[in-house]
Image: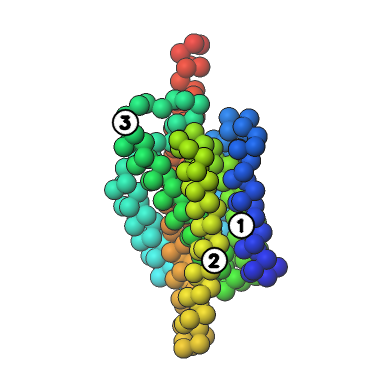
Amino acid sequence: MSLFNAALLVSLGIAVSVLIPHYWPGVRAHSKTLMLIGTVVLLAFVAFDLVPEMVEIGGTTALVIMGVSWLGFSAVHSMQGPHDHDSHHGHIHKAGDERKGHSISALLGSMILHCISGGMLLVTSYEMSTRMASAVLMSLIGHKAFEAISVSSLLIDRVKTKKQLYLYASLYALSFPFGVLVTVAAEGLFASSLSHETVEYAAMVLTSVAIGSLLGCLLQDFLLPSLRDLKRLAMPVRRTM
C-alpha cells in the first residue's frame, strides 16, 4: 500500500471513530476500557517490535534519541500538570471553569502532539522497511480507533457548546494527516540537497523521536490514567466484600 493510501486510511478511521460517541452515546460508557485495550496492544508493539528494530538500525544513537525524546515528553507533561481523565459520567470534582479549561487544553494539546508523532512515524517507517511500514500501519489503525472514541467521549463530557466540540474534534482528527504532510514536506525540501545516506540517517532520527514521544504519551496519557481509573472502580467493590 502506498504512503498516501495508508495515511488516508488511518485518517478516515480517526474521523469515523470521533463521530461514534456522538451518534451512539452508549459507547461512551466503555470508552476507557477500549482505550486501555488499544494502548496495551500498541505499547507492546512499540516495546517489543519497533524499539528493537530501531536499535538494530540505528544502534546506540537510536536508543539515546528515543530515551531523550521520552524524557522530553515527560518533562513537558509534568509542567502541564495532571490531566483530569476521570471526568466520565459526571464524576468531576468542581474546581472552577479555569481549571476545567486548562484540563481540556492540556488533554487536546497532548493528543494533537501524539497524533502528529504518529503521522511522523508512519512516514518515516516507509523509509525503514516494508515490514516496519506494514506493522506501523496496522497498529495505528487499531490504536487510533480506540483513541479517537475515548478522546471524543472526553470532549463530549467536558465542552459546553457544540461549536467547541466540533472545533476540538476537528483539530484532533486533522492532526494526524498534518503530521504526515509536514514530514513529507520536510523530506521533499531537503531530499534533493542531501545525500542518500544523510536522508536515511534523518529518517532514523525522526523515527526515533516519534517512537520516544509515542512511548511517553502511551504511558503517561493513556496507560497510567486508565490503570488509576480501574483502581478507583475496583475500590467500592472491595469495600462491599
Closer mark to the observer between disc 1 and disc 3? 3
Residue that numbered label 1 is attached to: 11
Query: Mark 2 or mark 3, which is nearer to you?
Result: 3
In the image, is residue 163 above or below residue 158?
Answer: below
Name the residue carrying label 2. Answer: 180
Picture residue at 33% right of the left edge, 52% below the top: 76
Q: Are marks 2 and 1 in contact (CB under 8 Å)?
A: yes
Q: Distance between the residues labelled 2 and 3?
A: 37 Å
Looking at the image, do the residues carrying marks 2 and 3 touch, with CB atoms under 8 Å apart? Answer: no
> Which amino acid lies under the numbered mark 2 shown in the image of this protein?
Val
Percent x, y for residue 104? 41, 42
Amino acid type, mark 1: Ser
Labelled disc at residue 204: none
Q: x and y percent of residue 115 in the render? A: 50, 56
Q: Is residue 193 above or below residue 38?
A: below
**Which residue, given by chain and number where applicable, does mark 3 sit on?**
96
Amino acid of disc 3: Gly
Q: Is 170 situated left or right of 7 in this image?
A: left
Exactly how many numbered labels are in the figure? 3
Could you tell me if residue 49 is visible in this image? yes
Secondary element type, mark 3:
loop
In the foreground, 30 or 58: 30
The CA span between labels 1 and 3 is: 35 Å
Between discs 1 and 3, the one toward the N terminus: 1
Up the image or down, 239 lies above or below 186; here it is: above
